[in-house]
Image (tube, coloured by chain):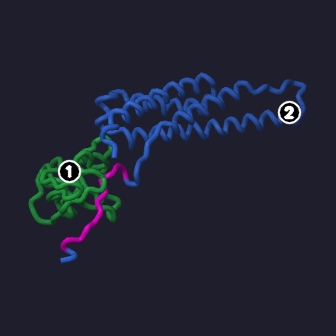
Chain colours: A green, B blue
Amino acid sequence: MAPSLREGARVLVTSFGRKRVGDIIVFPLPHYPETQTIKRIISMDETGLVVEGDNLTRSTDSRHYGTISKDVVIGKVQFQYYPKFRWYI
Amino acid sequence: MKKLFQTRTAEAHCDIPCGVYENDTIKHAAETVFKMATKMHDLEFPGDGATKEEVVSYHNTMARYVQVKEEYAHKCKEQILILWTDYFKPKHLDQFPDVHDKVWNATKLCSKAKREGTVEAAKELKAAVGEIADMFEKAEGSSATYNY
């Protein structure tokens, strides 16, 4: 998710709140559900969410595993509090 | 309360299992194929008056060269396909619109090197692999600013 989120960044994730395009969300990685992953919503429709990492050349995301279901989303990022407080990511 | 504010780790890094990509393997494999093809070509053919030992030795050595050539041509094809399917992303197509053709060509040449075993075929493979290795290096260079 570089450059928006750097390794080790801490963010507050909440399960409530409407998810919108542009939001960063946390969800179980398809095929590896024990791992949670964090990506940005690029588009959404009734079939699911298209997510991509901001670091496009390095990210594994909807371009590889397709859309993800809204039901599996753990929550959305509200703000970053470490290493720096930032409302807008 | 504790459950409400539990901390968990979310991965954002590249491929899971993490994909570390390089172009050394394909270059090394193509070079090995070329070297084996050259050795096969240079191996002296036992003449009419050759002893049984000389004939056996010739076939044994040739078989070993062929075996290594086959192994590395296969490895080369496998690694090229890994770069193509896992490393190169749609974004790279803007920079390298001919990546599909080059991969197609190079992997076909892996088969040709297996089938024909000539120095010429191995040379063609080396050249094609070199082009893919160059593309990889350029792609890596252009994404370097976003590295973790």
Marks 1/2: CA distance? 68 Å
Label 1 or label 2, whichever lies nearer to me, is 1
Q: Mark 2 points at which residue?
A: B54
Which amino acid type corresponds to the residue marked 1 in the rendered image? Arg
Q: Image check: A23 left or right of B61?
A: left
Residue A55, compared with residue B11, is above or below; it is above
* Chain letter of the residue carrying label 1: A
Closer-to-camera residue (A24/A7): A7
Q: Which residue is drawn at 61% across and 38% down?
A: B70
Contact between marks 1 and 2 (CB within 8 A): the answer is no
Residue interval drawn in magenta: B4-15
**Residue B10 is covered by the magenta coloring:** yes
Q: Describe residue B121's horizontal placement relative to residue A83 as left or right.
A: right
Q: In which quarter of the image is residue A75?
A: bottom left
Q: Residue A40 carries which label?
A: 1
- In the image: residue A46, left or right of residue B117: left
Does B32 appear in magenta?
no
Q: Which residue lies furthest to the front in this view?
A: A84
> Which quadrant of the structure image shows residue A80?
bottom left
